[in-house]
Amino acid sequence: MNIRPGIGINEIELGMSQTELIKTVGKPDKIISIELINDIRLIYNELMVTFCFSLDEKNKLYFIECAN
């Protein structure tokens, strides 16, 4: 995995839409909506990555969490 701080990982870049992300890496294993902070998280178990989208920022990718 090529981590690019402030930019993204591999071909995934901060600011992408959910549609762009799903086109790139496929359907997520799980989608979680967190109403309290107004965001949506797409979880990819095999990649060990969670992508976070802000509904306040036009549903754009703003945070990537990965585990090793």
Image (spheres, rainbow, N blue to C red):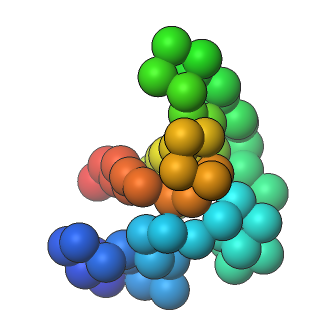
Instruction: Give the quarter of the image for residue 34.
Output: top right
Tag count in the figure?
0
Question: Which residue is pictured at 54% across the width and 40% down the height?
Answer: 56
Where residue 55 sits in the image (x, y, percent)? 60, 40
Q: Reply above or below: 5 against 46.
A: below
Where residue 19 sits in the image (x, y, percent)? 77, 66
Q: Reply above or below: 36 against 44.
A: above
For residue 57, side relative to residue 29 (left or right): left
For residue 62, side relative to residue 57 (left or right): left
Instruction: Give the quarter of the image for residue 23.
Output: bottom right
Where residue 9 sits in the image (x, y, percent)? 38, 75
For the N terminus, the image quarter is bottom left
Q: Nearer the viewer, residue 26 or 35?
A: 35
Can residue 36 be seen from the camera position used here? yes
Q: Reply above or below: 42 against 11.
A: above
Question: Which residue is pictured at 63% across the width and 51% down the height?
Answer: 59
Q: Nearer the viewer, residue 16 or 51?
A: 16
Can residue 41 be seen from the camera position used here? no
Question: Which residue is pictured at 36% across the width and 74% down the height?
Answer: 8
Residue that protrudes farthest toward the top in the picture: 36
Q: Nearer the viewer, residue 11 or 58?
A: 58
Where residue 12 sits in the image (x, y, percent)? 50, 77
Question: Which residue is pictured at 53% across the width and 50% down the height?
Answer: 57
Q: Nearer the viewer, residue 66 or 38?
A: 38
